[in-house]
Amino acid sequence: MAGDQGKRFASSLLFDKAFVNGQWVSAKSGKTFEVTNPATGELLGTVPDMDGSDTRSAIETAHKAFQTWRDVPAKERCTVLRRWSDLCTQNKPELARLLTSEMGKPLKEAEGEVNYGISFIEWFGEEARRAYGDVIPSPTSSKRMLVLRQAIGVCGMITPWNFPNAMITRKACAAIAAGCTVVLKPAEDTPYSALALCELAKQAGLPEGVLNVVTASRANAPSVGKELCENPIVKKISFTGSTNTGKTLLRQSADTVKKASMELGGNAPFIVFDSADVNAAVQGAMASKFRCSGQTCVCANRILVQEGIYDRFVKRLAEVMNEELKVGDGLEPGTTQGPLINKAAVDKVDGLVQDAVKSGAKVVTGGKRHTKGSNFYHPTLLTDVTPKMRCSTEEIFGPVAAIMKFKTEEEALAIANATQFGLAGYFYSGNIGQIWRVSEKLEYGLVGANEGLISATEAPFGGVKESGLGREGGKYGLEEYMEIKYVCMGGI
């Protein structure tokens, strides 16, 4: 347990040790690093600052556990995951409060994320019992041809700070359900949500060594990632984060030919055509843009509005932003916009806004740092944005709605697809033909047609182009952690 200062925030589920082989452990060096509340700057506590050597030990532990866990019947794995989900449900208020304290998002959003995380534990527990193989009709009477699906092995995982609960369960529970074991490094900003999940997994009866969490500071993160990628025991690497880091991890994984899942950066277009229901489009933009204070990979990054409804859309969006968005500490009632994760994030967002203004964009509302503290930024609406401005070419990751005008469907699609990213795209239209055309022509792994919130446990999640490899969630998520084995039986 963390000290008294930390206990004010989450009491029984706040742990100051890493979790390896079912035990709470320190770094071999004895070093720790601090975790702070981004809204207040207060110290939440310290956790071990582990390195490559610590990670290697965790990998060896996971490998040993894999020898028995892979042979546990799917029904038994499902039962353990069900107990884990039940315990998370029972502890939901505490998990949500802990999440808000270390990450900053409003408590209501944190509760929603915990629910989302629980849904992945449940889903993959159920999917474990549906990891079917095949019997292939043989070309000869003397042979039988079988296809088996088997757990891939030890899986290395690196998860982000913006969804410190659900991104862990979406990855780890798929692997565990498949019969794999896990070594996971949570983001240095948000280790406590990961450690809380470990405690509840332990209470649920998850065997020692199946789930291992190593914590590391920003300085030690590269050595942890390198070990996960280069260690030949690890058969799969799963990462959510920036495209540049993802490319580094892929290069490091090449020599051991690891299977990889990469959910990387985005630059999501949000297109509003003249035929759209303006009020519905505004609500969709609010949900897509300002959830998590704009700090999600699938946030609307470029809002393209057709010229016939441009002025009406801008006016209505500004009204709704002013009516509905309240900046503050995520633990304060009524807050809808918490802090950004750190001051560097605020500096980046402000730099993008100032660049846009210098290049001709207009600030309708916001456009400056917030007096709430160094990690807060006013929800901002920019108009007259162009495709060449930095806020159009870079991922904003903040509460800035950047709006540009377009004339034709062809122009909108050309702008939307003119990026190396391809994670999520959105559009609003009342024309059924246009809905089909645009859905098919948007070069994105996820598309929302007349919908601003598209993530769901049952659906595949992942991008194309430089936004990633593989899919998480849905029935496809389990496949990422399994190998296909062909068995040919002769002498029949």
Image (cartoon, rainbow, N blue to C red):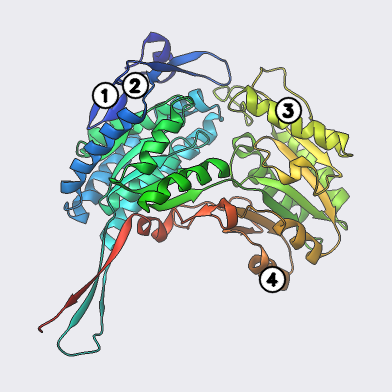
Q: Earlier in the sequence, mark 3 or mark 1?
A: 1
Do the residues under discs 1 and 2 have CB atoms within 8 angstroms?
Answer: yes
Q: Which residue is mark 1?
A: 24
Q: Earlier in the sequence, mark 1 or mark 4?
A: 1
Question: Toward which corner of the image does residue 136 lie, by quadrant?
Answer: bottom left
Question: Toward which corner of the image does residue 147 lie, by quadrant?
Answer: bottom left
Say what amino acid the circle numbered 4 marks: Arg
Question: Toward which corner of the image does residue 464 lie, by quadrant?
Answer: bottom right
What element does badge 1 sit on?
strand
Quadrant location, the N terminus: top left
Please state the horizontal and vertical placement of residue 295, each as a whole percent of the image.
61, 37
The residue that appears at 63% across and 31% down in the rendered structure is 336
Decide if residue 91 is in sight here. Answer: no
What is the distance, in whole Å, between disc 1 and disc 2 at their CAs?
8 Å
Q: Earlier in the sequence, mark 4 or mark 2?
A: 2
Relative to residue 378, is residue 127 drawn left or right? left
Query: Which mark, by number, is residue 100?
Result: none
Q: Nearer the viewer, residue 151 or 12?
A: 151
Do the residues under discs 4 and 2 have CB atoms within 8 angstroms?
Answer: no
What element does badge 3 sit on?
loop
Please state the horizontal and vertical placement of residue 443, each as a whole percent of the image.
64, 61
Query: Which mark, by number, is residue 15?
Result: 2
What element does badge 2 sit on?
loop
Query: Which mark, by number, is residue 378?
Result: 3
What is the distance, in whole Å, between disc 3 and disc 2 at their CAs?
33 Å
Please state the horizontal and vertical placement of residue 290, each as a whole percent of the image.
66, 39
Q: Earlier in the sequence, mark 1 or mark 2?
A: 2
